[in-house]
Every structure is written in C-alpha cells, then in structure tokens.
Amino acid sequence: MDNLILSLENISKRFGATPVLKGITLTVAGNEIFFLLGPSGCGKTTLLRIIAGFCQPDSGRILLDGQDITGVPAHQRHIGLVFQNYALWPHLTVWENVAYGLKLRKLPEKFVHQRVEEMLTLTHLLPQKNLYPSQLSGGQQQRVALARSLIVRPRLLLLDEPLSNLDANLREQMRQEIKKIQKETGITMIYVTHDQREALTMAHRLAVMNAGEIVQTGTPLQIYFEPGNRFVADFVGTVNLLAGKVSGFETGLLQVETSEGLLRATGGGDFSSGQAVEIGFRPESISLRPGQSNVFRTTVTETEIGEGIMRVMATSPGGRNFLLHLPLETGRKLQAGQNLIFSVPPERMIVFPLSPSVPSAVKRNGRDKPHLP
C-alpha cells in the first residue's frame, strides 16, 4: 500500500478471561478515512484505545510511519482523538478550547492566534468564537472538538462514534462536514461506528469486525456487493438469501440449485460441485426487465416508502419472501396482491459457503424473511 501511515500487527487483548481482540492485523494509508465497523462489543473501541495509547495490547505491534510506538505514552504519539461526548472544557470559550493544545506547548501568541483563526474558519465556527460550549448546538460542539484535535496537526485522527449523540439531520450535516474537513486538511482518520450508513457513505475503506476479529476489509462497494461471508452480508445492509447446492459451471457462471430453481452467479472458482452454499442478492440489485437468468415470479404483499425508494415485500409461490428496493415512481404503482416478475443479473448475485453454525435463512423479528428496515 502506498503512503502507509499505520500498521497493526497481530494485536491481541484480553480483559480477565475474556478475549476482546484476537490477532488484529491491518494497515491504513495516508489521506484515508478508514472505518472500523461492527456491532456493540466487537472490540472496535478497545482497538481505537490501543492505537491512541490509552490501553496496552497483550501482544502485537503498532507502527506509525514505520516506527514502533507500542510502548510510547499516549501524549507522545502525535495522534488526535475526538470523543463521543466531545469532552470540551465547559469554562472555556470556543476560542480558548481550540487554542488549548497550542498554549499547552507554550507556542508564540501570534502563531496561536493565526492557527486558531484558521481552524475556526475551516470548521465554520468563527462567529461563535466567544461562546461557551453550553451555548452551542450539538453539531457546533462536535466541530469545536474536531478543531481542537486538528489544530495540533496530529499524524492521525481517531474518532470514536462522534455523531451518535446527534439527531438524524445533524448527523447527515456532520458527515459532510467531516468529509470536507478531511479533504481540505489531508489528515488520515480512523473512525469507529456501528452505523452502517455512516461507514458506507464516508469511508474510503473499512474493516468489518465481529467478536474481536476483522472478518473483511475493503472499499464500501466491495463490502456491500461482495461480502466475504454471511455475517458481513447480513450486518452491512439487507440481503435476500437462499440455501442451495452447487450443480456445476457453465460459460463462466456458477450454477446453484435452490428452492426457487436454478440460479446463476459470475465467478465461483473457489466452489466445487455439490458444495452447500448460500446465494442471494441485495434489494436494489433487481431488474424489472426479464433477464435470461435468475428470474423470480412473485406476488406483492407489502409496500413502504423509504428514503428515496419504495420498499417492496414480495412472496414467491413457494412461500419465499423477498425485500426489494425500487425507485419511488416505479414502486408507487404496486399494490398488495399484484404479480411482480423480476430478475437479478448474475454479476449481482452474492455467493458464499453455507456455514453449518448459521441458519440457512436470515431470521428477523421471528420471520423467515427479510424485514422492512
């Protein structure tokens, strides 16, 4: 990887008898927003604390710009951290909060003034410079926390669920603000979240974590459309899955026998004939124009307006339920009881080995079908 900033080598951590991190290895490049995404308790915040220096790993190494910083104290790592609760000084103004790190270093007043003004301009806080944190909105407080971390020009900026305390509209605004600030400053960010949308819309790359391990690393498009296993497919978004068995290969397509008939997918070189697999597709991967492969004949059972889409639940004659995402103008014409034929291009089919420890269908809300999120 070009311009490598951070390398984690086999990082492990236990709290008592409980393993929290199990041999984490990953790399982060310069000028990258890298996300750690996973459910609560998967170890992502512990990993962030280890990178920051607040917690020591039981084994493994942390390299920053090629230098081993595993045993270096947190305040000497040149790493910034933005907390979930902002951690602003309530008795200091916006200006004083942002200037705090530079004043601590006893830098010249003229330099401090110039740098604070630059940061407040960058984060659109100049009009609020004399206000106290209690007089600010949640989004403004979060921008103060960003400015305070950025002003010391850290080599790396860590963000721990920074938007979780904001309402939906503010979260969307701050996502755009953080992306803009990262682009303008060029700083490398590692961002912890359990919010899939945040990761998919902001990340250059992300690592999906589960039970103390990284289960897949890639770009948002790779993670979403090419999940490496069942956990990733189901955790990152919604997926329609069918259990099946590989029946062979034909003209470069993997063929899988399922309860819905023969389905075809591109690739599949790692599978063998007779192997038990799961095959499926994302709700928006469908076409209402009948294709030559993967044609589904269904009946609409439920519709719901989503964010810029129409969510449609449809059921096959065999009782299989599918969640589909259609453009609003298309979906609004559908009604319960109406027949709906759709197909899925082979290149949009998702296939991975069937794990004996995981049920063959996604269980949500007690139903053997995807739900309307």
Image: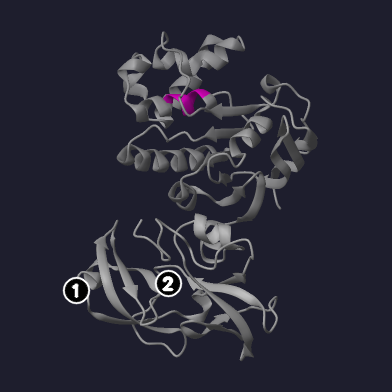
Which mark is on residue 333?
1
Between 276 and 168, the residue placed more toward the observer is 276
Would you identify the image quadrant in which residue 141 lies? top left
Is residue 329 visible in the rendered image? The answer is yes
Sequence order check, earlier mark of 1 and 2: 2
Q: Residue at x 32, y 41 (%)?
A: 168
Which mark is on residue 285?
2
**Amino acid type shown at disc 2:** Ser
Q: Secondary structure at mark 2?
A: loop
Q: Residue at x 56, y 78 (%)?
A: 244
Which colour assignment does the render follow? one colour
Would you identify the image quadrant in which residue 57 lies? top right
Between 71 and 318, the residue placed more toward the observer is 318
For residue 134, side relative to residue 151 (left or right): left
Residue 39 place in picture, x, y as percent: 53, 45
The CA distance from mark 1 to mark 2 is 19 Å
Q: Is residue 266 magenta?
A: no
For residue 81, side relative to residue 145 (left or right): right
**Amino acid type shown at disc 1:** Lys
Is residue 64 visible in the rendered image? The answer is no
Residue 188 place in picture, x, y as percent: 59, 40
The answer to whether residue 295 is above or below residue 88 is below
- Magenta residues, start to end: 144-148
Residue 32 place in picture, x, y as percent: 58, 46
Q: Secondary structure at mark 1?
A: loop
Magenta segment main secondary structure: helix
Between 134 and 355, the residue placed more toward the observer is 355
Between 184 and 192, the residue placed more toward the observer is 192
Q: Residue at x 58, y 50 (%)?
A: 206
